[in-house]
Amino acid sequence: MQKRYDAVVVGAGPNGYAAAIALARTGLSVLILEANETVGGGARTEPLTLEGFRHDVCSAIHPMGVVSPFLSELPLEQHGLEWAWSPAAIAHPFDDGSAAKLIESFDETVEGLGEDGPAYRSLMAPFVRHSRDLFDEILRPIRLLPKHPITMARFGLAGLQSAASIAKRFRSAQTRALFGGCAAHAFLPLEDVGSASFGMVLALAAHTVGWPAARGGSMEIIHAMDAYFRSLGGEVATGRRVASMRDVPDARAVIFDVTPRQLADIAAGDLPGRYVKRLRAFRYGPGVFKVDWALDGPIPWTAEACHRAATVHVAGTFEEIAAHESATWKGVASGKPFVLVAQQSMFDSTRAPAGKHTGWAYCHVPHGSTRDMTAPIERQIERFAPGFSKLILARHTMNSAQYERHDANFIGGDIAGGANHLTQFLTRPFPTLHPYATPNERIYLCSSSTPPGGGVHGMCGYWAAQSALRRTFIRR
């Protein structure tokens, strides 16, 4: 006789594990089903190039994992998770050999910005003083009555502006570019309303906890979550693809770490047609092109500050970043991309053999693009690190289509769980008072297509579990 579970979670990424842990901690029996032979979702680490080199396949740097109200209170360190910090959170090099940087010390960052220090302090100081309150508000579904109304009102006044508008507050090209690089994590044109909020949140995370990597690779976050989940009595089954509700074992609740259109494909027969239509209308965002390198030494940045940061934003000026992001949304793969670089091995010796290093980089490309961006990415890095190409021992590349084959949640290479334009980001997956619940009391959605969106923070899974606990379990 088939075992009946209290809950089945479909998808073993960070949000799937978060949902499963939140349910298992209440004493419920929980099974995770994963289509791939290994767990991890967007937090996998694999030997993509040469033996002894550990590469993060997708997510690499995890400030949101540290500030996450849920992940931060789990005993993940007891299950092997360690963080590796760099002295600077972010560095942004320029053609004159200098670089701007964000560090955890807010006062030192302000001082380093020179003439723009007062403007940056005016923008960020109210949130630095109340960072935990702000993260508590934004890492959850929107509350009609915020717990911290003054902080949220201030954040709304600035964050709902475009990144281009905020950048005009700064006099120097260096500060504008530094902020633009943070804001470009939104996968949005920097002229779009709301794009400023992404830059502000990521800068705030830098001042709150820094931008660490998981020692040994992003997969170590999943290994720790998996070990803790199993210690609670949870079960995991890999190689179990769910194509329809018939593939799900008997359970009182089923929580899906998939995107809305995938849920529509899987559960159309168990959901009202009008609801399925809304799921299918969900809009995805741009894709990514990713390169991993095995290197014969550290990236030879001209600017010293870049050797002190695990994350380096490569593009030059704000205007260059804005041009690339705008072109991406217009369906054009720019030949001069904004490149996000991570150099984890500089601060984590487990990533590469002695004396060797890893490099990790991606740029945004049009949704579903198969264009090879290897040469443009490497030219951009060579621009600020002459001699970089001579250090390459091996490389591994993935275009948007290959990303989707690697992880079915990355539709068209979209690693953000959907387009982040203001309306959809604030109301994902669509306007509703219950973003995780469906009209079927058994079925829930917990992916980054729900609030609070993309990132390895587990909060989408946590809030989906709370929704299930209230509606399916406690009520009965």
Image (spheres, rainbow, N blue to C red):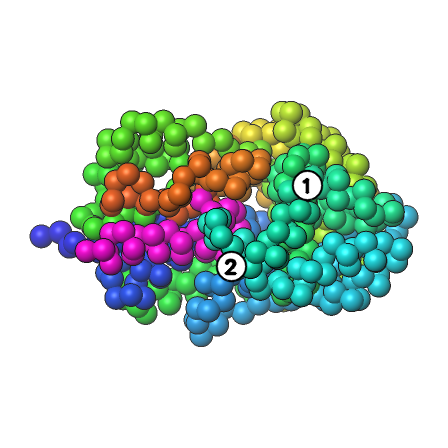
* Label 2 crowd bin: few (<14), some (14–19), many (20+), radius 10 Å: few
- Number of marks in the rendered image: 2
Q: Residue at x 30, y 35 (%)?
A: 266
Q: Earlier in the sequence, mark 1 or mark 2?
A: 2
The quarter in which the C terminus is drawn is bottom left
Residue 367 in the image: state x and y as whole percent. 56, 30
- Magenta-drawn stretch contains 394: no
Residue 107 figure quarter: bottom right
Q: Give the left or right position of residue 225, taking residue 6 as reference.
A: right
**Distance between the alpha carbons at the discs numbered 1 and 2:** 23 Å
Q: Which residue is mark 2?
A: 147
Residue 9 in the image: state x and y as whole percent. 31, 51
Give 365 or 50, whichever is nearer the viewer. 365
What are the residue bounds of the magenta stretch? 450-476
Q: Give the left or right position of residue 456, taking residue 468 as reference.
A: right
Q: Residue at x 29, y 27 (%)?
A: 273
Q: Nearer the viewer, mark 1 or mark 2?
A: 2
Q: Could you say which disc has been placed on residue 375 in the image? A: none
Q: Tell me: residue 42, above or below residue 319.
A: below
SS at mark 2?
Answer: loop
- Magenta-drawn stretch contains 472: yes
Q: Tell me: residue 299, above or below residue 272.
A: below
Type of the residue with mark 2:
Lys
SS at mark 1?
Answer: loop
Give 403 or 415, whichever is nearer the viewer. 415
Q: Residue furthest top?
A: 331
Q: Residue at x 65, y 37 (%)?
A: 193
Residue 368 in the image: state x and y as whole percent. 54, 29
Q: Which residue is mark 1?
A: 161
